[in-house]
Amino acid sequence: MLDVIIKNGRVYDGTGNPWTKTDIGIEDGKIAFIGNLGREQAVQTIDAKGLAVSPGFIDPHVHSDLLCTVPEVHKIKALQGVTTELFGQDGISVAPVSEETKPLWQKQLSGLNGDIGEWPWNSIDEYFSFLEKSKMVGNAAYLVPHGAVRSLVMGFENRTATKQELKKMRSLVEEGMRMGAVGLSSGLVYPPNIFSNKEELIEICKGTAKYDGCFVVHIRNESIHSLSALDEVIDVSRQSGVRLHISHFKIIGQGNRDKFKKALDKMDAARQEGIEITFDQYPYSAASTVFHAILPPWMHSGGTEETLIRLGIPEVRKRISNEFKTNTEYENWVLNCGWKNIIITSVQTASNKCFEGKNMIEIAEIRQQSPEDAAFDILIEEKGNVAMVIHWGFADDVLLGMCHPLQMVGSDGIFGGKPHPRLYGTFPRVLGKYVREDGALTLEQAIRRMTGAPAQLMRLKDRGLIKMGYQADIVIFDPEKIKDRATFDDPLLEPEGILVVYINGKLTVHHGRYTGAQDGHVIRAVRHSKIDLVGKM
């Protein structure tokens, strides 16, 4: 007797192939049979007539690294069909750390990843062990974060690494890969990653390429200098041999819209050259990140505490205010998008909660300050732990990226306060709006971008497809009813149309409700280095 039989559904296997009408049998957490199961019996039978049966969705860009251990918060990912997530994004995550760097990262990441108290780990392996003991809703894979590695070797110093420091960083990256990370991440607009140069990126990516890992990167600029920023990481891939993945691809600002198609062309050209490049994208024309990202790079030297001290110095505030208006050398959100399009979404103190959901012009009027002074003071009052949403672009550009064959769907969801609606709505929005309503993608195409494509990026051996022997991560949804409900005004509305979710064969969502199951796995990549494999041939 099987544990579960899913019958009569239209099965989309995650490859992009047309659907097939077949039954699926689940046993011991795996897909044990695909075919006619009319005579078989099971403990549980799901009649999926008229419904789509898909592999569980894989989110290749998230910030669930800590709150995945709080099921009542994290359950929203399962409720929109996400069964696996890729942690360690943007080069700024929770491991590896030391007793010296841990307090710095706890302060730096509180506004992005949330706060669960003490971190009882230092290494990536110890972090994995902590997650395994925490009973997660969904599955988690991890990227070695560039910033965490750099801070172990150099702190948050704004300078070029020495050859010896490069060697140490590469060694730490390779150690993280051997512990089970699937790749390396960097966010070249965030400290201390922002202080690195191309030589540093090439060296650490060589350590990733040695284990066939991917380099997942928030490029150095997504606006005025976006094309040269893309050239930089393509050349890093060319010289290191690493597989390249561009995080949350977009072009910021109306004056830069012509660069969107040019960037896609650059990625196509890199593919023709033989560079394995892909990108993820969320289905909205607004971004979300930490509020201190509005500050110029030199402000971040030394970490959060030194940044906050500088913000209290009048001469420094005046210099930053001038740079907001004129400096095009960094990712200047204020210059590119304007204060009106920058919205505070999450703060820590009760006195500032009233500002969540308001833009900086509105907040400045309430506080009777200039937007610049209001921004500086809020950062000080909140000890840097503030998140924001920025309206950066246009729906037509989102659609152009979504239809590109190198695209995969990623939420970049950030928990807390009044978040970007992508946290609750990304995957059902693609299936409801862009597939059913707009016809921009077929259901087969969209599901591949949510399942098989990110599994290929992460080199997952047993997830991302409906295939015998694979883990039973399965989503059943109504293609005629699935839709996102979260909006910028009301971002915590759960989606509709996702009826059943299995994670590792356990019923995690039933009739659209979270069952309380906590059967997620930590996915540790098991690999040999390319050198080892050559030696065995």
Image (cartoon, helix red, strand yellow):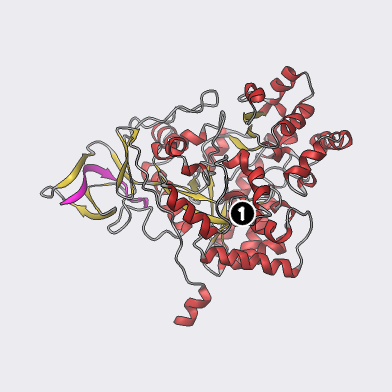
Q: Nearer the viewer, residue 203 or 380?
A: 380
In the picture provided, is 474 more to the left or to the right than 153? left
Residue placed under numbered mark 1 in the picture: 266
In the image, residue 221 sits, relative to residue 536, either above or below, namely above
Residue pictured at 68% horizontal, 36% vertical? 291
Q: Secondary structure at mark 1?
A: helix
Residue 130 in picture, x, y percent from top left: 48, 52
Q: Is residue 239 shown to the viewer in this render?
A: no
Residue pictured at 45% horizontal, 81% vertical? 536
Q: Is residue 478 a member of the stretch shown in magenta? A: no
In the picture provided, is 150 more to the left or to the right than 174? right
In the image, farthest residue toward the left? 39
Q: Residues within 10 Å of mark 1 (few under 14, many from 20)?
A: some
Q: Nearer the viewer, residue 233 or 73?
A: 73
Residue 31 in picture, x, y percent from top left: 27, 54
Residue pictured at 47% horizontal, 36% vertical? 73
Residue pictured at 77% horizontal, 18% vertical? 368
Rendered image quadrant of residue 365: top right
Residue 164 in picture, x, y percent from top left: 73, 70
Mark count: 1
Residue 279 in picture, x, y percent from top left: 54, 50
Q: Nearer the viewer, residue 49 or 273?
A: 49
In the image, residue 59 sits, relative to residue 79, either above or below, namely below
Q: Nearer the viewer, residue 275 or 95?
A: 95
In the picture provided, is 109 more to the left or to the right than 369? left
Rendered image quadrant of residue 152: bottom right
Q: Is residue 15 a member of the stretch shown in magenta? A: yes
The span picked out in magenta is 1-17
Query: Which amino acid is tagged 1?
Result: Lys
